[in-house]
Amino acid sequence: MTSTRQKSLKWLTAVIFGAAETPEQRMHLTFLFIAPWGCYFSAVFDAAVGITGTLYVAVLLSIGLAVHALWFQARRSLRPHGMAALFCLLMLFVVLPLSWFDNEGADGPTLLLFLLLAAYALGAIVLRPWQRAALIASFVVVPTVLLITGYRHPTWVPTYADPQQRLLDLGVSYTFSVALLVVLMGGYLRRFENEHRDARDTARRDSLTGLLNHGAFHGILNQYELERPLDSRAILLTYDLDHFKQVNDTYGHAYGDEVLCHFSQLLDETVADYAGVAGRCGGEEFNLFIPYATRDDIVALDSRLREQCLKRPLRHGPVCFSGGAALDSAETFSVDEWLARSDTALYAAKSGGRNRSLFDDGQPMAIMPTDTR
């Protein structure tokens, strides 16, 4: 039963959202999908209860079809924002004024629908300042004009047949408005959570390479120190690009940035297969933290990274680097001491000719030639 329900929910989600991924896109598509059903239900309800005439019922059905067409176009083009804006204009200047004159004016649910539409249009649709000002003015002017018209020409607006009919109409309209409001609030909350998460993630990333920055990477090491298991098999690597200052001086800082970004991409792709994380912790210095690994794993990682650098060279040649690896094998552990051992192995690799990596016990990893011909 649960599996069938999950499959049905997955199917419905695919139908409504298509390939949309962002919370904002999904909120607009959900609203555009549900709103026409409100029109269909209102048409059937008004006809059954006798609140409005046949012409208005036909108009509601036509508006529902038009909004569903907007939903379909938004789903197909993945541009729900523009379709949502068209929906708001259609509702504000056509549907709700018609509802006012056919559905009991100020005594009916139209003012409630104006308020719901304003919450959606002003809260969910991104607008330029002048557009927002114009929209706010419209939500003030249009209902005001309708109220004045209803006051001066009361005969233009029909009245309910009895109080029970009015209560039924308002009750149903209120319930449907709350349902749409739940959709809106859910979209707002998901968008807020995503924006908060993106901002937090951006603060943890190096602005050039997208890797973890110095603070975020050291935060992971400090957390590891607090939760370090007794049988830990973690390994820390420090990489440094060879002759990077010469690259900058020879080819310019723009090319130097290209080198950093290219190496960072290769580093990130490689470390992901070892369940590790990478960070840029200095100008041309990078750190890798692999929580569970053997020496053979690290040799394979280092060899693969070097092979990728050779296979995917930049216009002035492949990126060359030196590295040092430190195993978490000491009984007494501290992050500073671990980093120091990794740095010592890195400096030994550089002193030994560069373009190579060493473990902190002096054992070498693969050494790749710089001549790729």
Image (cartoon, grey):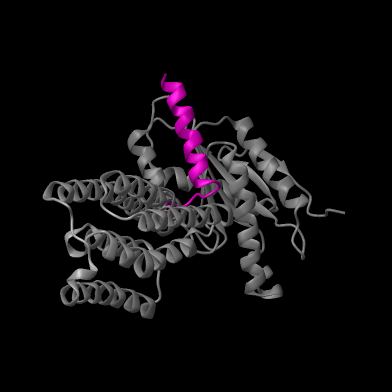
Judge by depth and name the residue closer to the eye, 363 or 245: 245
Locate the N terminus by quadrant: top left
Q: Using the image, determine if residue 6 lies above or below residue 155.
A: above
**Residue 211 appears anywhere in the view:** no
Q: Residue furthest left?
A: 163
Quarter of the figure with residue 135: bottom left
Q: Is residue 274 left or right of residue 136?
A: right
Q: Is residue 67 located in the magenta-colored stretch of the structure?
A: no
Judge by depth and name the residue closer to the eye, 259 or 171: 171
Q: Using the image, determine if residue 79 lies above or below residue 89.
A: above
Q: Is residue 238 left or right of residue 201?
A: right
Residue 316 on image: x %, y %: 77, 65
Q: Is residue 21 located in the magenta-colored stretch of the structure?
A: yes
Q: Which residues are magenta?
A: 1-23
Residue 112 on image: x %, y %: 22, 59
Judge by depth and name the residue closer to the eye, 288 or 268: 268
Quarter of the figure with residue 360: top right
Residue 298 on image: x %, y %: 61, 36
Q: Using the image, determine if residue 187 lies above or below residue 327.
A: below
Q: Residue furthest right?
A: 373
Residue at 56% across, 42% down: 325
Residue 204 on image: x %, y %: 42, 55
Q: Is residue 366 left or right of residue 331?
A: right
Q: Residue furthest bottom?
A: 130
Locate the C terminus by quadrant: bottom right
Judged by its main secondary structure, the magenta piece is helix
Q: Is residue 244 left or right of residue 229?
A: right
**Residue 237 appears anywhere in the view:** yes
